[in-house]
Each structure stands twice: as C-alpha cells, then as structure tokens.
Image: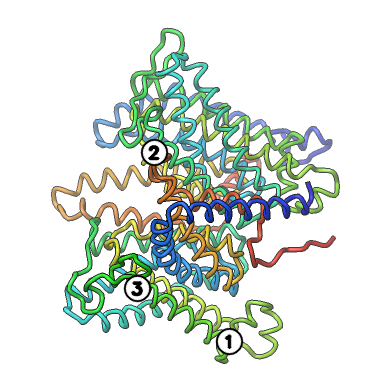
Amino acid sequence: MGERFYHTLWWILLASFVAILAYLSILNPTKFVELSLYGLVLGSIYALVALGFALIYKSTSILNLAQGEFLMVGAYICLSLILQFQIHFVWAFLITLLFSIFLGLAVERLVLRPLIGEPIISVIMVTIALSSILKGMVIMFWGNDIRPFPKDIPFLAGKPFSVFGVSMAPIYIWSFGLAILFLLLFAIFFKLSRTGIAMRATASNQQVSQSMGISVKKVFAISWCVAAVVSSVGGIILGYISGVGITLSFFGLKVFPAVILGGLDSILGAIIGGVTIGLLENYSGGYLDHIIPAVKEVFPFVVLVIILFIKPYGLFGKEEIERV
Amino acid sequence: MPSGLFHENYSNDERIFQTLWVKCWLWAFILFLFFGFPFIVSDLNKILRFNILHTAILTGIFVIGAHGINILTGYTGQISLGHGAFMAVGAYTSAILMTKAGFPFILSLPCAGLLTAAVGMVFGIPSLRLRGLYLCIATLASQFIIEFIIRRWTGLTGGTQGMFVPYAAIGGFVFDNDRKFYYLVLVLAIATTAFTKNLFRTKPGRAFIAVRDRYFAAELIGVNLFKYRILSFGISSFLAGIAGALWAHYISLIIYEQFTIHLSIKYLAIVIIGGLGSVLGGIFGSIFYVGLEQLLEVMSKELSTSFPLLITYFVSIKEIMFGLIIILFLVFEPDGLAARWRTVKAYWKLWPFSY
C-alpha cells in the first residue's frame, strides 16, 4: 500500500463526507445552520487554543500536555478577580492576560529550559508533571466544584441575537468575535512585527536564525507566553459558557485532534483544524446522538485516529523525509 | 574464587546470573517473599496501622503492568499514553467472562490478556506510519475511545455504576483474603519478571532494542519494523491486561473512573522513576510509587485529627507531589532508581572478594 493508496482514500473520505453534509443540509436547513453556527463558535475557541499549542510545537518541538491546565488557571484567575476583588470584567480579563504572560515565562524558564536536548519522553512527562502541579494548586486554592461566572456582566448578558434565523446568546457572538480578533492580531504579529518574524525564522531553522542574531531563548519564552495568553482567553470564554471547573483542563486534550488535522507544526493548519473539529463535534452531536448517546465527547478522537492513519502529517504539516 | 568478572565465552556473558552470589541472594529474597514477608508483615500491621500487605499486592499488580509499559516504551521506544485503558480492557474482560459467560478464573485471566493484546495491537497499527509524538497522540486517542466505550456500553460493563467482580478461584481454592491474593500476585509478578528479563535475550527482544536505538539501521539489517512494533504493542498490552484482571479481582468493584488517562500517566511515571529500559526499573518504580501513595494516604488519615484541613488539601497535595517527583527525577536522576541500584550492586557483586 503506497502513498497513492492513502491519497485516494483521503479524497474518497473527504468527498463522501462533504456529500453527507450536503444531504443533511438539504434535509433540514434550519438544524444544519444552527449546528454550523454553534460549531463555528466552538471551533474558533479550539482554533485559538490550538494556535498556542502549534506555536509551542513549531518553535520549541515540545508537545505541551499542560495546555488544558493553562486554560483552567486563566479561567479561575479571571473569575476570582471578578468575584473576590470586584474588578470590572474588562480589567479582570486584561489582568488575567498579564498573569498568563508571567505564568508562561516562569514555566519556560524554570521547567523546560533545563530539559533542552533531552529525549521526547522526558519533555512529554515534564509537561504532564506540570499539568499535575497546576491542577493540584487550582484544587488547593479554589476547591473542586464548578463555579459559574456572574451573569450580570454588561455586553455579555443581554437579549439573544438572531443570526441567519438562529437565536444566539451574546456570549457566543462575543466569543467568536474575540477569537477572530486574537487570531487576526497574531496573524499580523507574525507577518509584520520584528519579533513575529524572528519567531517564524526560529521555527523554520534554529541554528541559522541563531547565527543571524536572533535570541532563540527569547523566542522560546515568547512562544510560551503566547500559548499561555491564548489559552487563558479560551479558558475565560469557555468558563463563561459552561462554568469554571477542573473539567476545563480536559479541553486541552481535545485540542489534539485539531492540531493533528492541521498538521502539528502549522499555525494556519491549527486554525483550520480547530474550526473543522469544532464543526465536526457539533454535527456528530446533532446527527448521531440518538444512535450513540454522547458520541460528541469521543468523536474528535475517532477523527484523530482516522487522520493519523491516512494522513499522518495532517493538512499542512511538514512531512519528514528521511534519507539514508 | 574469581576476583573479578572475566567472561571467557559468549554463553558466559549471556548468563542471567553473572555470579553465584547474585543467584543466592535472589533465591534468598524470593524465599523471603514467600515464607517470611507475609508473616512478619501481619504482625507489623497492628503496630503501624498501615496495611503493608495491601500495599505489597498493589505493588505486585503495578509491577506486572510496569513491565508491560517498559517493554513498549523503555525497550521499543514507543511512548504509550493508553495503558490505563488497556488495563481496563483486561479488567472488564475477566470480570465479564466470569460473571456473564461463567468462565473459570484460570481461563478468564489469559483470555483477558489475549483480548487486551489484540486491542493493543489494533491501536498499535498507526505505528506503521507514525513515530514519536504522533504515535503518542494516537495512543492518547485510544485511551479516550476505550474509556468512552466502557462508560457507554452499560449493558455489558455496568456503565457509570461499575460492576462487581467475583473472587478469583483456582479449582476449589478461593483467593478471598489479602494473604491468599498476595501469593497469586507474587507468583505472577515473578513469572512476568522472569519473562521480561529473558525476552531481551531472544531475537524479538533484541529486535525491539534495535528498533528503539536506530530504527532505520534496524530496518536495513532486516528487522521488520512494523512486525516488531506491533509485537511489542501486543506483549505490552497483554501484560497490562493481566494486571488489569488481577486489579479487578482484588478490588472487586470496577468503574471506568479507575482507568482514566491519569492511570496511563501513572504508569509512565513509574517506569521513569524506576528507570526506562530496565527490568529492575519497573519493580523499583512500582515499589517507590505505590509505597509513597499509600504512605501519603495513611499519613493524611493519621494527621487529620490534629489537622482537619489536611483532608481537604489531600487531593491537591497528592497531585502536586506527583508532579514534583516526576520533575525532580527527570532533572536529577533521568535514568531512574535502577541506575542508582547498579552502582550499589557493582560493589556487592563480588562480595566479599572485591577490590
């Protein structure tokens, strides 16, 4: 079975999938639009978190299994700033972002820098250990139960909008807008700013960029900061939608299918993968739920296995060509 | 009496027991485990208020599973984040075969191992085209898929209610208390250890190591990469299945929550603490980890009268300790406890005539 076989299989799978979706959209347009819209919102959050994930992988070759915990910590901090210190939501949001920058810096400096050059398993285990420590600290400070955000935040609480005939709560519109805003900001950052270009250079070749005078260490640190910041944004949005709890950390693992679909080392791929997985999750929830209850939880992972088998390097991932 | 280790031919070099002393010490230790340990411990239990026999049984079960993941991750170099789920497959298979199909324990245990091996091999198929991080993610997906199936297939597995598991019994002999179960686990743990130790003196074992160290070179000299990777997945998950079945019969109530991603991570932590790619590593890691966990639990119980807050913080302290131990081991002792042991052993190997 050569590459050609997998290539054909991939296109057949894609075509049949599009055909099924087209059929379903004709069958019940309202339901399809509703599922698509909510899927887009969920997907945009996935895309945001996946962006941080892919960025870390691309620039430092580290698989960050603590991404979900970053998300959770961000949500908890924002929540307690609002509840305990009575800070306005916007300020709490900004302070949380500031905190995430420090969290990212601390993690990179204290835990990951000593392990540069160690084998893959050590680096994976260290991020797992990190996630355990962060989770332990969150349980210590905030306990185990799910806490909702206060529902009287201006802008976010209000009358539902009507989008294409589907009524959506404002938080969904806001979260979609926020996710798109952050994605755009980072796109501009990577395209135009000096630091962003340095980061892309480091990602493509560390040694060459180091010899051109780029501080690779600084780039690593910034990557972790960016990852922590985007996770916090995702965490706050998700926390507002479904309540802040330990389960938020699970979201970090669900980002895997998104990054694998896009290709682990592609930032554009992470965004497209994130949106696709969000849509798929919602479609499976809407159309398959009466056959297999709660299939939504596991569907991304099924997709993940299929992608890994047919297209191991995802849509935009760099294929590793080996020469002897 | 030799005053050093001098290998004069290959068979000499390949011996498991390099010197007579090692063999003697090992037999003495095994005899102690059989005839000394359970009796000493039962007296100690009353004094210490710490159930050592229970800890020993858990350790034994973890030793079997740890050998499994060590074969896969330590020797073949394929990182698995799905061993918790593989253990669940073993546990549920044995339980279902005994309660629903009326199998005797002596049959259900190997069946559990074999089915788990089959499941492990299916999820190992991506290793045909994947390496390293990508394979690690594929096994992570297997963890979630298996967990989901167990949780939702209520008719077979009891879903979120869990299911009761009967006692293990061979012939008319029922393993219904800790002491009896200790012997069952001990025999199986010793058999597994002997199997693992010997595996790496055979062709497949050496092929595993070749695949880990230089997979490309291994393929060039005729090692079929795919075959040996799948075989490694099979053997590894077979042992995980056996460990899971034993766990089920010991705990008697199994719920999917016992086999989450956390268990998979725990297994990886155990082999890292003990030492990747070392048979002793699996044993040391299990003793260290299970012992520490039990100790923490007992301590928090004992101290809860004077410090009632400790119970609320117990979960978080455990999580933080777990993370810290892994990080500390990775930074300060990357080769694990087994490496430390080797330096100690080098001294004792030729005792009393070393110089």
Q: Marks 3 and 1, Cα distance to the nearest angstrom?
A: 27 Å
Chain hosting mark 3: A
The mark lying in front, picked from 3 and 1, is 3
Res B23 seen here: yes
Q: Marks 2 and 1, Cα distance to the nearest angstrom?
A: 46 Å
Chain hosting mark 1: A
The residue carrying pointer 2 sits among few (fewer than 14), some (14 to 19) or many (20 or more) residues within 10 Å by Cα, namely some
Pointer 2 with pointer 1, Cβ within 8 A: no
Chain hosting mark 2: B
Q: Amino acid at mark 3?
A: Ile
Query: Within the image, what quadrant is residue B257 found in?
Result: top left
Give the camera-side residue of A128 and A68: A68
Question: Residue A312 location in percent, x, y?
Answer: 66, 56
The residue that mark 3 highlights is: A173
Q: Residue at x 32, y 44 (%)?
A: B295
Question: Residue B78 location in percent, x, y?
Answer: 63, 49
Q: Amino acid at mark 1?
A: Lys
Res B324 seen here: no
The answer to whether residue B80 is above or below residue A211 is above
Q: Residue at x 27, y 82 (%)?
A: A90
Q: Marks 2 and 3, Cα distance to the nearest angstrom?
A: 34 Å
Query: Within the image, what quadrant is residue A140 found in?
Result: bottom left
Q: Residue at x 69, y 90 (%)?
A: A212
The residue carrying pointer 3 sits among few (fewer than 14), some (14 to 19) or many (20 or more) residues within 10 Å by Cα, namely some
| The N terminus of chain B lies in quadrant | top right
Does label 1 lie on the same chain as label 2? Answer: no
Looking at the rendered structure, the secondary structure element under dot 2 is helix
The residue carrying pointer 1 sits among few (fewer than 14), some (14 to 19) or many (20 or more) residues within 10 Å by Cα, namely few
The residue that mark 1 highlights is: A191
The residue that mark 2 highlights is: B151
Q: Amino acid at mark 2?
A: Arg
